[in-house]
Amino acid sequence: MVAVLSSCLSLASAVPFGLPFALAYAPEASPIEQIADELGANGLPYALPIHPNLVHLTIGLFVIAIAFDVVGALYPLEKRVFRFLALPITRGGFHDVGWYNLLACCLVTYLTVAVGFYEMLTAVPLPGVTSTFGLGSMTTMLVHGVGGVLLLAIITAMTVWRGFQRFAWRRDMGRQVQWLYLLVGVVMFALLGLHGTLGAQMAAEFGVHIAADQLLQAGADLNTALP
Amino acid sequence: MLELLPPLNDHNLPWMDTIHPIVVHFVIAMALIAFVFDVIGVVWRKPALFEASFWNLLFATGAIFVAIIFGQVEAGLASPYGASRHILDIHTTIGWSLAGVLSLLTGWRYVLRNRDPEVLPATFLGAGALVSSLIVVQMVLGDRLIWTYGLHTVKVVAAARAGLI
């Protein structure tokens, strides 16, 4: 205890204008201990984490929304090819996918982020692990948490933007979306990919909410603990 | 021959991360939202949702074959243990079956759309509900492989290599 306090104090003194007493405080036990009895081996009060399943919807819906708007935007180039398909195709149909998928993505992502925060508050990452990106578990979780809120904000803004294009600005136009919108969408692919990789590292590398990893860390024998 | 294969990393994979879970985003999200759009389209009489649903279903059907290819490679490298071997078997069987089921559903939808894109019979909604339930079962099985048994996680791969599992 004294050692912890003194190391905290030395850390605090290294902060030139911070609040030294904020860093000097060392809790007896992690707050998660208060609900530890209610949590299973995976660190959750239920069998399987929900956030990664909602993520399927967020990523799938967003990517396909933008992809179909791109296909709709490039329709004049494609229609010569579409003629050879025994498939009735309209440009508006592609943009319908672009709009409704993004709307669904926006709605479901509020749940994705909310559940994500719950499951991150109950996360117990494996100690001493550094990710493929060279980050520790706390940094990974902070970036993933703040990044998740930022992505939600961008998705919401893009949904409003998409709605204005569909119902007001470009209502009577064949190409329902602006090129800038598609560009922002493609940049978002990269951000979502990076963000998703951080999330995947929380599972596969830091073992967050994975029963087998947590049991191994606790010294259990998986042959008997997970029959 | 074996030395010609790429080396495996600490996830026991020849590539950085599992790819199967990334590809299944597009099967799960597109197939489930197709059913949701169909239901809302029928209830609110919005044919534009039927169009969005059709394309989502078509995309899900294309994506499931890619998901199966990566799923088979990564299942082959997963070294499952205990009950996860059994779960992986069922997950594989349902996965291949779903490829057939989704193809049939999409074929049926293609015929319906060619006849009248603004109408959807209740029988198709029923089939959509059944297929969606099958997808949810398949998701739960896949979830158990990663979140309960930790297949392809660094910790479990290390334990398997050390002979602890």
Image (cartoon, coloured by chain):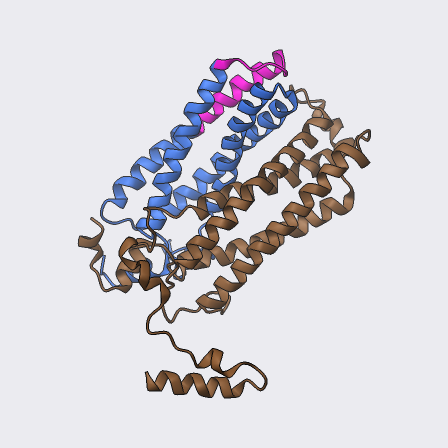
Chain identity for the colour blue used in the image? B
Tell me residue B71's x, y (percent): 41, 42
> Closest to the observer: A117 or B24?
A117
Tell me residue B147's x, y (percent): 35, 50
Classify residue A60 by image quadrant: top right
Decide if residue A63 is on the left or right side of residue B3: right
What segment is highlighted magenta in the picture? Answer: B99-122
**At 55% from the left edge and 45% from the top edge, which residue is drawn?**
A109
Q: What is the chief secondary structure element of the magenta stretch?
A: helix
B140 up-or-down from A172: above or below: below
Magenta region includes residue B104: yes
Magenta region includes residue A166: no
Tell me residue A198's x, y (percent): 50, 58
Tell me residue B8's x, y (percent): 40, 58
> Closest to the observer: A86 or A113?
A113
**At 70% from the left edge and 32% from the top edge, which residue is drawn?**
A95
Q: Is residue B160 visible?
A: no
> Closest to the observer: A215 or A14?
A14
| Colour assignment, chain A | brown
